[in-house]
Image: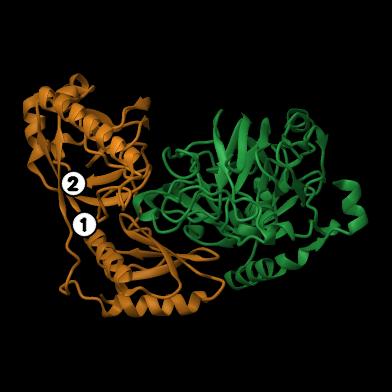
Chain colours: A green, B orange
Amino acid sequence: MQSGFKIIKPGFFSLVQDLGRTGLAAKGLSSSGAIDEFAFRLTQLLLQNAARKNALEVALGGLTLLATAATVVAACGADLGFHINGKLKPLFRSYRLNAGDVLGFQGSSQENSLAAGTGTGNWAYLAVPGGFTLAQHFASTSVHSQVPGIGGIHGKKLQHGDFLPFKPMSSASTKLAPMQLRQQYIPSYGASQTRLILRTVLGYQHSFFTAAEKQKFFSETYLLSSEISRMGYRLKGHAMHPSHGRHDILSEGLSFGAVQIPKDGQPIVLLKDRQTLGGYSKIGSVIPLDCFALAQCCPGQKLCFKEISVLDAQKKMREFYAALPALIEPIHPSASLSLL
Amino acid sequence: MDKSFFYFEVASYNSLILYFHGAKAASPKSPAHYNSNNSTAAPNKINQQAAGKVQLAYECLQASKLAGLTELVPSYSSLWLSYDALHFSQAEIQKQVSEILETSKASQQRKATKTLRIAVCYQLGEDWLSVCRQTGLTQEAIIKIHMQRIYKVYAIGFLPGFAYLGILDPRLHLKRLKTPRKHVPAGSVAIAGEQTAVYPLASPGGWHLIGKTTMKMFDPALPGLCPLEVGDSVQFFSISKKAFLHSISKKASLHSTSKKASFTI
């Protein structure tokens, strides 16, 4: 039998994602790719995978998989009730699997936590050594939530009866030591009552906004609305208004993290599956690092914008990528025994 | 191109946007190139001078293979670009891009742009009644006017492969629908404001539907994803309903044979 995962239950919204594709924005196709690149990259690191390998991005849970062969998996991101053979397992670490093992994300606690506003995160990642062996479309296997026919399996979210093939265990993957994220780096995904800071580079039409308006933007507390998707997250709070009511502009290219101000003045932070062109004024762009954190926030999360210079933003991003490998550690043999 | 023709604005930590003016003296804060028409209809006013500069800049930067440049998005009067910010500074990229643009000349060897001829079954337009009423023209007259011009691709976006084509004859300029349709079928040929377009995928939309085509404007199997690029041209020609249906069945049979072929491999 081919080695891979048989999809017992596809879940509500499970997508194959990698780091996305570049070069097609001029044709109207945005990059797509893992919406929380932090959790995604950790998942790959735990398996010593190259960052460009793919993983399964799971929203809302409801996913059940059957392993047809032995492998190793790593799971990171939102707490959607990750389980192996019926037992709940901690995230942010890797596990050995045997043929016949059943795993998945229950997603049962999600609705309750949304209501309580505590927050467990939105997106979980599951990867295997070497990634899932799927055909690439334009150098990526990412599915685009807005565009059918690209990436994944038949360019769609996971369906009943799909099969996610992976490479049979190699001698290298047999030797993979179980790894975990160091305890102190495990993210809390908005469970705290403190505001999440969205560091923002001023740009685009920022000169349309008066100094007083910008000062409000960078001091007021915003709340995350319930309108969140892979395209973008809509915020609620102080309505931003450009001087002379210049909300509409000629359509122009949109960056990852761009903060668009539509007519009602409520900011929208644009994410991986955004449109490539937009005709609303933008005040600037949230740095990717904070977009990843925002992606995991649940509706009601308190947020605030903080200005950052381009130079500092680039420094932060370089530091972020450089620091990743040191965030993980091998699982102590005795600890791993008790967990396996 | 003279350096007074363009200026940079930051777009994000790793992207910049270049703005091009029709006029030479505009300052970065000048709203001159922004659309002053704030109504919901026809949000994009075409400035042909600016569009020509965008096109030249887009071609030159594509051809330059500038190290660190990762993506370009041309639009009406702007060119968005992203770069590898882990290895290149904004200052470096800005300097290199400026040099490339300043040495570019409108007269230099231009990339061959193509003219795509699109067969339209105008009979299948859903909005003829209202389009005729609003323009005060007959269906025959409107079709003739729509086919007469060769349109330029000013931008591609909204949906992958959705090419904004202009400039429509002023007699056909209509405001967008007050209430957008929830479902516009793929292949619908539409007009709004001074532009015309083909819906590449089924989607919501507020344009007036005047025909249908079987031409695929978005196809993941195409090497370039869609048959058009910014700067290309489009001309529409009319076909009968019979020819339209024939073209659908021909495409369907082609599709099935290609499927069979790949199956035997």
CA separation in Å, label 1 and label 2: 9 Å
How many other residues sit within 10 Å of disc 1, few (<14), some (14-19) or many (≥20)? some
Q: Position of residue B67 (x, y in %)?
A: 42, 75
Mark 2 or mark 1, which is nearer the start of the sequence?
A: 1
Q: Among all residues in the image, which is located at the extreme top?
A: B129
Which residue is at the far front?
A1
Residue A157 pos. (x, y %):
53, 36
Q: Residue at x 32, y 74 (%)?
A: B64
Residue A266 visible? The answer is: no
Front one among B73 and A202:
B73
Hey, what amino acid is under mark 2? Ile
Mark number displayed over residue B167: 2
In the rendered image, the quadrant that contains the N terminus of chain A is top right
Tell me which corner region of the image, top left, top right, bottom left or bottom right, holds residue B124.
top left
Residue displayed at 57% across by 72% down: B86
| Mark carried by residue B48 | 1
Up-down relation of residue A192 to residue A148 (above or below): below
